[in-house]
Image (cartoon, coloured by chain):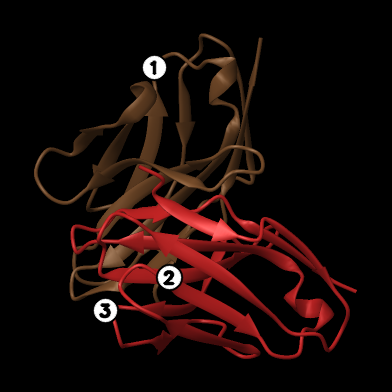
Chain colours: A brown, B red
Amino acid sequence: AQSVAQPEDQVNVAEGNPLTVKCTYSVSGNPYLFWYVQYPNRGLQFLLKYITGDNLVKGSYGFEAEFNKSQTSFHLKKPSALVSDSALYFCAAVRRDNFNKFYFGSGTKLNVKP
Amino acid sequence: NAGVTQTPKFQVLKTGQSMTLQCAQDMNHNSMYWYRQDPGMGLRLIYYSASEGTTDKGEVPNGYNVSRLNKREFSLRLESAAPSQTSVYFCASSEVTGELFFGEGSRLTVL
């Protein structure tokens, strides 16, 4: 079965410290990989995606993600967290032969404390 | 540019009542989706439409029907609502390049 896993329900980090939100995937065929952010009572917003090429992908709001094919991981990172980064983060994957079926992780709540 | 617009934003139903969630996108996307979001379960695909005139079941289609009225609009209907359908519903659209654009969500409570 195809799946995306986010092993941490919650990540706590102090403002100014680096943050990492973990994601691993089990989706066949070199999938496209995505990160989305959801603020309270809002829809999901696209942050970044990996298609091919450089393993470090840069996205919105200073976020970046590191793709590791051997570990089938796509971890979200930011060098210096802001309180305003506190939100729910979702990792997702889609197969290249079927762009209509996204596989979402269960989400990780990021808490950035002042 | 409004993106993806969903109505209504909130709705309370009694068991057995019916309702339709409306969704429209103004980005000329071919694909549209309906997801539901429940705590701890991420997003689950209910139905999708890869192009005007086509619809396909997703992961959790039971109890729902959809209509792709035209390229812009994709509606979700609950014929006989059940408490298990209490959820937040999101409409989304995309092009072939992949990223989804989401609406703000419709919060449905079934009593």
Residue placed under numbered mark 2 in the picture = B33
Instruction: Name the secondary structure under disc 3.
Output: loop
Measure the C-alpha gap from mark 2 to mark 3. 11 Å
Q: Are marks 2 and 3 in contact (CB under 8 Å)?
A: no
Residue B40 placement (x, y as % from top left): 67, 58
* Same chain letter for marks 2 and 3: yes
Residue nearer the viewer, B12 or A64: B12
Q: Which mark is residue B51?
A: 3
Q: Judge the density around disc 2: few (<14), some (14-19), many (≥20) Cα neighbours within 10 Å.
A: many
Residue type at the position of mark 2? Tyr
Badge 2 or badge 3: first in the primary sequence: 2
Residue placed under numbered mark 1 in the picture = A79
Residue A22 placement (x, y as % from top left): 46, 42
Q: Chain of mark 3?
A: B
- Residue extending farthest to the left is A53
Answer above or below: position of B69 versus B41. Answer: below
- Tell me which residue sits at (90%, 74%) in the image: B111
Residue A30 placement (x, y as % from top left): 19, 63
